[in-house]
Amino acid sequence: MFDGVFVAIVTPFKNGKVDEKSLRDLIAYQIAGGVDGIVPCGTTGESATLNHEEHDQVIGIAVDACKGKVAVLAGTGSNSTQEAIELSHNAERAGADGLLQITPYYNKPSQEGLYQHFSSIASNTSLPIVLYNVPSRTAVNMSPETVIRLAEIKNIVGIKEASGSLQAISEIIDICGKDFIVLSGDDPLLWPILAIGGRGVISVTANILPAKVSAMCKAAADGNLAVARSLHYELRDINDILFIDTNPVPVKTALYLMGKIENEFRAPLCELSRNHQEKIKEVLERHELLVGK
C-alpha cells in the first residue's frame, strides 16, 4: 500500500488559518501528477505548530480529497506517547489509511524507550504504521537493531529513513526483507536508496514536480535504472534548492512563486531572505515553473 511516491504535503495558510481551498487544489495537483499517496501533518506540513483542531482538520481534508484515488498516510507523531496515540485515534476515525510516526523529538529517548513508544502506539491502533527516522530534526537516531525489533510487530509495516546512512538503510532492507517497506525521507538520496532496494519516497520535491518524482520511482521499480538515474540528475537542482533553508520554508516559497499557495508560514518560521528567493526563482525558471511573481 505504501510503495512509490507519497508527498510530504505542505499546509497552506491564509490570514493565519488553514487554507482549505489551496490544500485541496494542491492535493489535486499531486494526484494528477501520478503520486501514490499524500502525507498530511508531517514535518513539511508544519505539524509542530498546528493545534489539535487544525491537525485533525488537515487530515480530514486530505482524506476527503484523496478518497477513492490515493492513500493517506497521516502524520500523527509526537514526543509524548499518549499524545501520539490520541492523534492516531483521531486520524483512524477520519479514515486515514495509515500513520507516519516520527521518533520523539527533544526528550531523546533511549533505544528501549523508542521501542516502547512505537510498540505502545501500534498496540492502540489497527492502522498500519510507517516509522520515521530523522535525527537531524529530533536529536535521536533509531538504530537498525531497534527498527528490526519493531518490524516484528504486525502493523508496523515500514520506515521513512532520513538518517543519511546508506549502510544503516542497507542493513534494514537486508534483514527485514521484502515485506518491510523502506522509503527515502531525503529527496537528494532517493536514487541511491532506490538502487539498494528502497521502495519509494515520502517527498518534499514532489510538492513541486510530482510527475517527475513519480516517473523516477516507477522507472526504478520497473528495472529501468538508467532512466531513474537520469531523472535523479534532472531533479538535482530542485532537490538542492528546496533545502537551501529550513524545510518547509523553501518549498512553500516555491509553491507561492508557482501561484499555488500564499507565502505564509506559521511562526517561528518566516519568509526567506531576498537572496534565497532569487535563487529559487532561477531554478523554477529553468524548469518552466515560475508564474511571474
Image: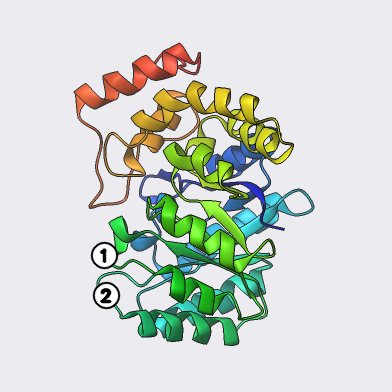
The Cα atoms of the two marked residues, 2 and 1, are separated by 6 Å
10 Å neighbourhood of mark 1: few (<14), some, or many (≥20)?
A: some
Residue that numbered label 1 is attached to: 139
Query: Could you tell me which secondary element the residue under label 2 belongs to?
Result: loop
Q: Amino acid at mark 2?
A: Lys
Q: Amino acid at mark 1?
A: Ala
125 or 214, nearer to the observer:
214
- Whether the residues at callouts 2 and 1 have beta carbons within 8 Å, the answer is yes
Residue that numbered label 2 is attached to: 108
Q: Quadrant of residue 25?
A: top right
- Specify whether 246 is left or right of 20: left
The residue located at (30%, 64%) in the rendering is 138
The residue located at (40%, 55%) in the rendering is 43
Q: Which mark is residue 51?
A: none
Question: Is residue 123 shown above or below 21?
Answer: below
Give the quarter of the figure containing the C terminus.
top left
Q: Is residue 154 visible?
A: yes
Q: Quadrant of residue 97?
A: bottom right
- Specify whether 115 is left or right of 281: right
Percent x, y for residue 122? Answer: 57, 81
Question: Is residue 137 shown above or below 120?
Answer: above
The residue located at (49%, 72%) in the rendering is 147
